[in-house]
Image (cartoon, rainbow, N blue to C red):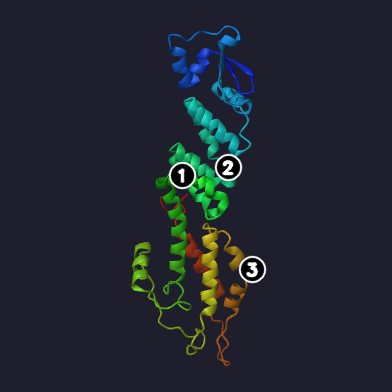
Amino acid sequence: MVVLRSLEGTLYQMDSHTLGAGSGLFETILSLPQAKTHASCDDSEVVPVYEPDVVLDPFLRLLCHVAVAPCKTYDDLERLLMVAEKWDAQGAITSLREELACSRFLASDPLRVYVLAKHFAWKEEANLAATQTLRLDLREPDHYSALAELPSHELLPLLKLHRTRRELFKTLLDSSARFTVGNRLASESFLVVEHHLFDSVPTPSESRVCPSCGKTQLDNSPWQALKAVLVDEINRRPLGDTLESILGEKSERPEAKACWEARCRDKWCGGLNYDKSATVRQIKNCLDLLPLTIQGRGV
């Protein structure tokens, strides 16, 4: 038997074979010629491990294959994984890995899950977490400490995912092929982007006149203002799930109302400048084209 002493002084008696089988560290220690088999709890036979009870107790239960309640917080899970790594407890790490990707941690701490998954080189969990970070504005100070834990080669792909969604969304909103009434003729560079994204590209319309009377020059400032609001929102929350607060039926955003209510200046026409339902549908189509993961589309 082996007796372990926690940071608080609590003694834990462990079967040496179980401890060695579950921990590569103790397998090495127990195999040393000077290692003794402990039969009592004398101070000379106690092994201090310098882990607090709150971590050591559930961790030793994992080593003994005793059922352990799921971690209540991400911090609890992270502490257990760090001990498991230090003790080279591969079985415990495997069990805790399954818990890392559960929905509650991905929802509450996606960035920290990403950091931990990258630390252990778990690609699938890192990819899932990267997608969930799209609900975050990584420019907020609350995220600085987690971002600082990432080496540059792990940080840059995550930042690129966020930036790419914003830039591609803006590019698609500026497309005359997609929004023929509100935008100017697409530039050659944009058509190159569209060529790589889609099999075919609609021919842009050169007409910037009222779609109803066909002669009055349009004032497209309402559409330009709405685009700016949409890009700002996806910059704040790259996932784009909050765009409904701007585009939905219950939206009170002045830029959206001004856009949908904009009419032809010809008093004999007065037709709406923009088809709201078609425009909103096209905006959502643009959102669906944005990459969701570091590797591309998909979850």
Mark 2 and mark 3: span between their CA atoms?
A: 31 Å
Secondary structure at numbered mark 1:
loop
Residue found 52% across the figure and 50% down from its top: 133
Residue occupied by mark 2: 105
- Of the numbered discs 3 and 1, the one sitting upstream in the chain is 1
- Callout 2 crowding tier (Cα within 10 Å): few <14, some 14–19, many ≥20: many
Residue type at tag 1:
Leu
Q: In which quarter of the image is residue 229?
A: bottom right
Closer mark to the observer between disc 2 and disc 3:
2
- Of the numbered discs 2 and 3, the one sitting upstream in the chain is 2
Instruction: Residue 116 in the image: state x and y as whole percent.
Output: 50, 39
Q: In this view, does 266 lie above or below 196?
A: below
Label 1–label 2 contact, CB within 8 A? no
Q: Is residue 220 above or below residue 148?
A: below
Closer mark to the observer between disc 1 and disc 2:
1
Residue type at tag 3:
Ser
Instruction: Residue 50 in the image: state x and y as whole percent.
Output: 57, 24
- Of the numbered discs 1 and 2, the one sitting upstream in the chain is 2
Q: Is residue 129 above or below residue 160?
A: above
Secondary structure at numbered mark 2:
helix
Q: Residue 183 carries which label?
A: none
- Callout 1 crowding tier (Cα within 10 Å): few <14, some 14–19, many ≥20: some
Residue found 60% across the figure and 11% down from its top: 43
Q: Residue 150 carries which label?
A: 1
Mark 1 and mark 2: span between their CA atoms?
A: 19 Å
Q: What residue occupies the far bottom of the structure in this picture? A: 268
Looking at the image, can residue 294 be seen? no
Instruction: Residue 280 in the image: state x and y as whole percent.
Output: 54, 69
Mark 3 and mark 1: span between their CA atoms?
A: 38 Å
Residue occupied by mark 3: 251
